[in-house]
């Protein structure tokens, strides 16, 4: 397993895994698969995102195939630059339980620690995703709130736990 910071050259692999994530775990993302596939020039959009300063997307590769991803984004406004957010965390089902998610999150957390301004990392997770929540808690994240009815997928509502990790 190799984990690295993704670059615009990884855009196609990222987009393929992103579509898989939206299909496999629709309750875990704010974007739907149906919305995603309607985007014009999605690879170009991903290339731009992967090249954006302050946006760090890490990918886990197994046998040269992207099988996991996570994004760390630092807040931009002066009053919130001490915060960063974890987004788009996903690991393909065939490699779950092998430490891929932990490895990805550790890369993101370690990156946040190298940026002097970042003191806190936030994330949101579907309240019913016990495995993910267990991992986040193991890495030091704490729940600071629960948003009921955060997402609605196929007429079913999902709550989200909002979690944070203090770095300093």
Image (cartoon, grey):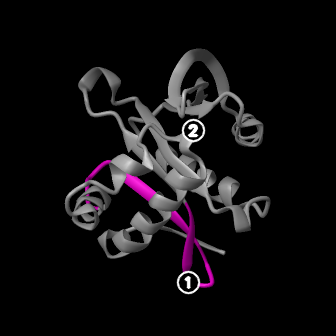
* Magenta stretch encompasses residue 18: no
Residue placed at 21% from the left, 63% from the top? Answer: 41
The picture quadrant where one finds residue 78 is: top left
Residue matched to label 2: 27
Q: Is 103 left or right of 48, judged from the image as shown?
A: right
Residue under label 1: 64
- Identified at 66% across, 31% down, the residue is 141
* Of the two numbered discs 2 and 1 in the rendering, the one whose residue sits closer to the viewer: 2
The label shown at residue 121 is none
Residue 142 percent coordinates (x, y) = 67, 25
Q: What are the residue bounds of the magenta stretch?
A: 51-68
* Residue plotted at (38% across, 35% down): 117
Residue closest to the far bottom = 63
Mark 1 surroundings within 10 Å by alpha-carbon count, few (fewer than 14), some (14 through 19), many (20 or more): few
Q: Percent position (x, y) of residue 118?
A: 43, 35
- Image point (28%, 54%), residue name: 38
Instruction: Specify whether residue 50 is in view.
Output: yes
In the rendered structure, the answer to whether residue 79 lies left or right of residue 24 reads left
Name the foreground residue: 166 vs 45.
45
Q: What element does badge 2 sit on?
A: helix
Q: Please, is residue 56 above or below residue 92 in the view?
A: above
Question: Looking at the rendering, which quadrant does residue 161 occupy?
Answer: top right
> Which part of the image, by quadrant, shows the C terminus?
top right
The answer to whether mark 2 and mark 1 are in CB contact below 8 A is no
Residue 65 part of the magenta-drawn span = yes
Question: Can you say which quadrant of the picture contains the N terminus?
Answer: bottom right
Which of the marked residues, 2 or 1, is nearer the chain's N terminus? Answer: 2
Instruction: Report the label total.
Output: 2
**Predominant SS of the magenta segment:** strand
What whole-number distance in Å separates the C-alpha atoms at marks 2 and 1? Answer: 28 Å
């Amino acid at each position: 397993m190799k984990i690295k910071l993704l670059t615009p050259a990884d855009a196609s692999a990222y987009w393929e895994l992103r579509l898989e994530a939206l299909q496999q775990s629709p309750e875990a993302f704010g974007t739907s698969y149906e919305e995603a596939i309607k985007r014009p020039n999605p690879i170009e959009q991903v290339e731009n995102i992967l090249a954006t300063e302050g946006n760090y997307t890490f990918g886990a590769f197994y046998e040269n195939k992207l099988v996991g991803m996570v994004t760390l984004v630092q807040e931009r406004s002066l009053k919130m630059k001490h915060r960063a957010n974890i987004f788009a965390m996903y690991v393909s089902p065939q490699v779950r339980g092998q430490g891929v998610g932990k490895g990805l999150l550790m890369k993101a957390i370690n990156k946040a620690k190298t940026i002097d301004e970042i003191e806190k990392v936030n994330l949101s997770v579907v309240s019913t995703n016990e495995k993910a929540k267990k991992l986040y808690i193991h890495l030091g994240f704490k729940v600071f709130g629960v948003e009921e009815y955060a997402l609605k997928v196929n007429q079913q509502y999902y709550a989200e736990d909002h979690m944070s990790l203090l770095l300093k």
